[in-house]
Image (cartoon, rainbow, N blue to C red):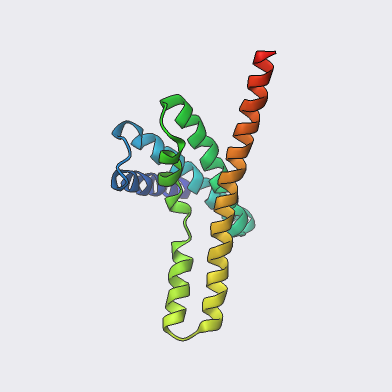
Amino acid sequence: MEYILQFLLAFGATIGFGVMFNAPKNVLIYCGLAGGVGWIIYTVVMNTIDQNIIAAFLGSFVLTIISLLFARRLKTPVIVFIVCGIIPLVPGGLAYQAMRHIVTNDYQLAIEFIFQVGLVSGAIAIGIIFAETLNQVYYGIKGKLVRS
């Protein structure tokens, strides 16, 4: 039941950001699905191994794969789905904690949070790049096989 609620909240947040980013109306539901699935992957990994860097990588990887599939099917740029869907994975809570500790002059803890923000953000970026690279390799090999 918790995962259903988590999915619905991420779905709604993703659609909300899709509206804010002026995503086409016909793809908003798909943006929500991509964001919801990416968030569920993140949540399942966090509940299983409690490693937010690995969870962010896998969440963004799956999100990008789904976004690539939706983009092909709906003939829409993949960036529409990725930008909207990545919102639930962005480490805003960690960034807030870092700023809070800077304001309270607890610089040691602030540096730890800033480091975590950088690692999670990097994991998200690497997940997107890895999925996109696999997609290009797959369709490159598929295209060569079809032509020969």
x, y percent for residue 19: 29, 44
Quarter of the rendering occupied by the C terminus: top right
User: How many numbered marks, from 0 up?
Assistant: 0
Question: Could you tell me if residue 125 is visible in this image?
Answer: yes
Whole-percent x, y for residue 144 in the image: 67, 20
Q: Is residue 46 above or below residue 101?
A: above
Q: Find residue 108 and report its image quarter.
A: bottom right
Q: Is residue 56 something that shows in the picture?
A: no
At horizontal 46% and vertical 79% (from top left) the residue drawn is 101
Q: Nearer the viewer, residue 7 or 20?
A: 20
Give the residue at x 62% y 54%: 54
* Residue at 55% from the left image edge and 51% from the top image edge: 125
The residue shown at (53%, 65%) is: 117
Q: Quadrant of residue 133?
A: top right
Residue 22 position, x and y percent, is 29, 42
Residue closest to the eye, 139 or 35 = 139
Q: Is residue 51 above or below residue 127?
A: below
Please state if 38 lies on the left or on the right of 24 as rendered: right
Q: Position of residue 37 (x, y in %)?
A: 49, 42
